[in-house]
Amino acid sequence: MILQHLMVIFILWSSYTVGQERPCDYPEIENGFIYKPYWQAEKYYRSLFPQSIGEIMYYRCNENYVPAQGSSSDYWTTFSCTEEGWSPVPECIEEVGKCGPPPPINNGDITSFALHEYAPGSRVEYRCQKYYVLQGSPIVTCRNGLWTKEPTCLETCTISKEMMMKNNIELKWVDAEKIYSKTGEMTEFVCIRGFRKAPRSPPFRARCTKGNINYPRCI
């Protein structure tokens, strides 16, 4: 009698243990399919389930569908067997809100080759040409068929000898024929020897603003 009780306990424990270690049944994916070796028959492949904890599988979605986790439809997505089942749950949703090419910007461009179409969630980076300063986020994202706001490229200020001579000023710290000042940067001037600050002259520390600089004047 004792032996029979022990056998029952062992069977129940074994069933519980197996259930705990192999909690993941064959994943039926609507509008998608899991990866399986091409040489294995479907019937045999299904016989390998349920799978054990820690096992990793891959799936792809059918055309015009994407993984619910936001991965690209062009790649296999990773999911694994856990004590609670498959995680993340393999799911394919209808792909909506594709974007066309990202909008062009003046004096700048994207850092990658432009495509004719982008999947939702795609990201593109912009950069400005030399002597221009990027304002705003360099990254735009495709959301609901539209790109988030693109950045702008602000022109630098060209400080030339000609403009300084016209206002009887010179650079306080640098001796150069021409310098470039980025938007927001300050440049400091002084009067040329023999001249003095003109009444109502702008400040001698001038800020470059979108390609323009308000020069101080000396008389």
Image (cartoon, rainbow, N blue to C red):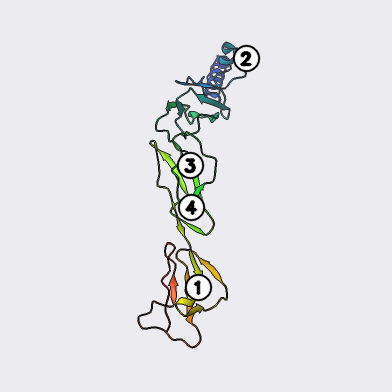
What's the CA distance linking mark 3 and mark 4? Answer: 20 Å
Identify which amino acid the numbered label 4 is placed on: Asn
Q: Are there few (<14), some (14-19), or many (20+) residues within 10 Å of tag 4?
A: some
- Residue under pointer 1: 162
**Dots 2 and 3: beta carbons under 8 Å?**
no
Q: Quadrant of the N terminus?
A: top right
First of labels 3, 4 by sequence position: 4
Identify which amino acid the numbered label 2 is placed on: Gln
First of labels 3, 1 by sequence position: 3
In the image, 42: left or right of 90? right
Front residue (pair 71, 176): 176
Q: Are there few (<14), some (14-19), or many (20+) residues within 10 Å of tag 1?
A: few
Judged by depth in the image, the label closer to the viewer, 3 or 1, is 1
Front residue (pair 139, 185): 185
Residue drawn 45% across and 21% down? 31
Residue drawn 51% across and 36% down? 115
Identify which amino acid the numbered label 3 is placed on: Arg
**Dots 4 and 1: beta carbons under 8 Å?**
no
Residue 107's disc number: 4
Residue 187, how many percent across, how many down?
Answer: 48, 72
What's the CA distance linking mark 4 and mark 1? Answer: 26 Å
> SS at mark 1?
helix
Judged by depth in the image, the label closer to the viewer, 2 or 1, is 1
What's the CA distance linking mark 2 and mark 3? Answer: 38 Å
- Residue under pointer 3: 123
Residue 163, how many percent across, how many down?
Answer: 47, 73
Judged by depth in the image, the label closer to the viewer, 2 or 4, is 4
Residue 139's disc number: none
What's the CA distance linking mark 2 and mark 4? Answer: 56 Å
> SS at mark 4?
loop
- Residue under pointer 2: 40
